[in-house]
Amino acid sequence: MHKKLFVAAVLLMCIGGVSLFAQESIESLGFSLDVVWLFIGAILVFIMQAGFALVETGLTRAKNATNITMKNVMDFCFGAIVYWALGWGFMYGDDLGGLIGTSQFFYSPMELTIDNGNFFKSWFFQVVFAATAATIVSGAMAERTQFKSYLVYTCFISAFIYPISGHWVWGGGWLANLGFHDFAGSTVVHSVGGWAALMGATVLGPRLGKYVKGADGKVTVKAFPGHNIPYAALGVLLLFFGWFGFNGASTGIATVGEGGIWSGLNIARVCVTTTLAAAGGAVSALIFSWIWFKKPDASMTLNGLLAGLVGITAPCAVVSAGASIVIGLIAGVLVVLAVEFIDKVLKVDDPVGAVSVHCVCGIFGTLAVGIWGNAEADGVLGLLHGGGFTQIGIQLIGIVAVGAWAAVVSLLLFLVIKATMGLRVSPKDELVGLDQSEHKADAYAGFQIFSNM
């Protein structure tokens, strides 16, 4: 009898030990899956740097291709260093009044712990977002900006402008506490980059020959067609590809968890809504530009696809598949109207339509949360699903606050750079092309490049 009790006790201990080991193994496996998914997502977002480089190169003139390529390479390299040194701390350090982070500057832990592992995976995912916000500015200021000035302001955006507003929304700041929802960055990333791009292009002024005033006082807007539409199309497709990491990995985890928008269960929904919005944006931009310009405009269609992606970035986790198509369709029309308005009414020269895509459609995508949001369990319920105007009001507060921050600070930054080290190349260098004047390296050596300016 005693032997049977002893054996039973041993078996119970073994079963308990196996159960405990299994539980720990499952938790460890779950953490590992989360780490791998976030790294895959970050790598996908990193590929977007190549996409931006090709889009901007393709939609501008051949004499500036080397310069644009260099900017898109170096804004990540400089940005990664300053985001590690300062940006991460401002964004995710200990909160001060909901406004700014105050710790983890120059953070460099060596001990391999769960906490440190969380830091490394989160930093790697966030640094590619910081680079995206900075590189948006490159396209709007293309073909006439000094390379050294570009490096200065892109560092400032990655180290300060993007992280501060990012703290408000993603770092536990005041907008997060208010209930502002921006799942993957329509405002935090795209509108911030878009507002900075608008300020930069305004301070910089238009390219030579862009706006020509006639004897009658009427201003003629001259088009400078991009030199390589296949480059631009390939770049857009790379951006589309990378966006599955941009939006999909913003769940933060791959495991099921408790369910809801931050669960790995939502990855599939996010990728579906992202795909459909992009498709809707391309289709509506194609049809609308076809009607408007009497031709199926290639550059507008490509920007329409990007507009759909930017528009769905904030609401992708809280809207249905059908709503995502509607959001994309609206964004595709918006981007065509915005390009025309900014170019011909405001007379702001944006060679690639960066402000229209990222700022205008970023604002729309953020508002879309308050209209089509349908995730009551997660506190996001839009107007069309019985939530009234509450979420729209919160979204508007976030749009205005982040927009004011990004616009005012970047405007001051560009004015200071212009007054000190200079922002724009000389007219002679602009006419020659920045490849030769800034880098002494033609993008297409051995080919004769003909320029319309």
Image (spheres, helix red, strand yellow):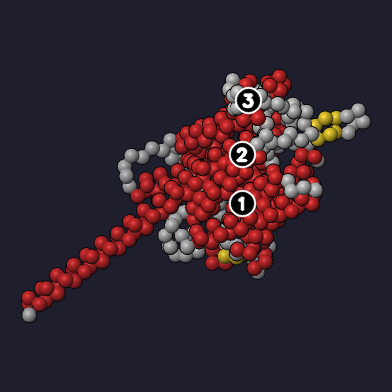
Instruction: Measure the alpha-carbon separation of dots 1 and 2.
Output: 19 Å
Instruction: Measure the alpha-carbon separation of dots 3 and 2.
Output: 17 Å
Judging by the rendered image, the residue that carries numbered circle 3 is: 447
Earlier residue among tags 1 and 2: 2
Which residue is more in the foreground, 174 or 156?
A: 156
Residue at 64%, 28% (x, y): give it. 64
> SS at mark 3?
loop
Contact (Cβ within 8 Å) of mark 3 with mark 2: no
What amino acid does circle 2 point to?
Answer: Tyr
What amino acid does circle 3 point to?
Answer: Phe
The N terminus appears in which quarter of the rendering?
bottom left
Dot 3 alpha-carbon crowd within 10 angstroms: few under 14, some 14 to 19, many 20 or more: few
Give the image quarter of residue 420. top right
Give the image quarter of residue 21. bottom left
Percent position of residue 231, x then y:
61, 39
Which residue is more in the foreground, 192 or 284?
A: 284
> SS at mark 1?
helix
**Most distant residue in the bottom direction:** 1
Earlier residue among tags 3 and 2: 2
Percent position of residue 276, x then y:
61, 58
Q: Which mark is residue 309?
A: 1
What amino acid does circle 1 point to?
Answer: Leu
* For residue 319, above or below residue 152: below
Q: Which mark is residue 231?
A: 2
> SS at mark 2?
helix
In this orientation, does residue 132 appear? no
